[in-house]
Image (cartoon, rainbow, N blue to C red):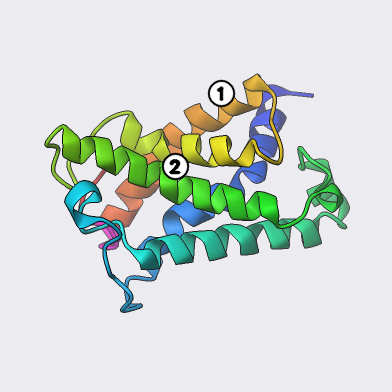
Amino acid sequence: MSFSWLVLQSLYFFLPAFIANMAPEFFKWIHFNQPIWEKKLGKNKTWRGIIVAVVFGTLTFLLQKWLFQFSFFKSISLINYSDFGLLLGFLMGLGAILGDAVASFFKRRDKIKPGESWMPYDQIDFAIGALVLGWFVYVPKAGIAVIILVSSFFLHLIVSRIGYWLGIKKNKF
């Protein structure tokens, strides 16, 4: 198996966390924007974000379970999706948003303003959270976790820049 194929498999496996991390940006129109704990996390960590992230992480995993019946998707899958319930997608979605919230807690504690860059943590906080919570159901090999973390860093930079250019995000990072 080539390294590029392993990267593709890793990214496909981690799709619930990627989607969960991005989904709250697309649902700002939902008026359930009550901050979770504004004093410690800032005003951008909301109940809407948690709900949207968990729902979309779980739905993405459900889609992967369904797609597993097709040979192409079976070939790019790291896991046998028939062996797993929706709990893995739920945990990856919840872990992604909680990882981001934990990083916000430390940013506020260190007096870093919302929207200010805190590299590399801003780019991988969601991935760490999703991996940690996902480990309750499935523990990927260490090499897969490294691929996910490194890929998450670079993909986050690219997607954030595109979101900024499209006017979806307020900052480039």
The answer to whether one can see residue 52 in this image is yes
Q: Is residue 114 left or right of residue 29?
A: left
**Residue position marked by numbered label 1 in the rendering:** 146
**Tag in front: 2 or 1:** 2
Badge 2 amino acid = Phe
Q: Residues within 10 Å of mark 2 (few under 14, many from 20)?
A: many
Q: Quadrant of residue 142?
A: top right
5 to 26, vertically: above or below = above
Secondary structure mostly seen in the magenta stretch: loop
Q: Nearer the viewer, residue 139 or 150?
A: 139
Q: Residue 136: where, in percent of width, then height?
A: 66, 39
Residue at mark 2 to residue at mark 1: CA–CA distance: 14 Å
Q: Quadrant of the C terminus?
A: top left
* Helix, strand or loop status at disc 1: helix
* Helix, strand or loop status at disc 2: helix
Q: Is residue 101 left or right of residue 131?
A: left
Badge 1 amino acid = Val
**Magenta region includes residue 168:** yes
Label for residue 126?
2
Q: Which residues are magenta?
A: 165-170
Q: Are marks 2 and 1 in contact (CB under 8 Å)?
A: no
**Magenta region includes residue 136:** no
Q: Residues within 10 Å of mark 1 (few under 14, many from 20)?
A: few
Q: Earlier in the sequence, mark 2 or mark 1?
A: 2
Residue at the outermost top position? 143
The answer to whether one can see residue 117 in this image is no
Q: Residue at x 40, y 37 (%)?
A: 125
Q: Quadrant of residue 66?
A: bottom right
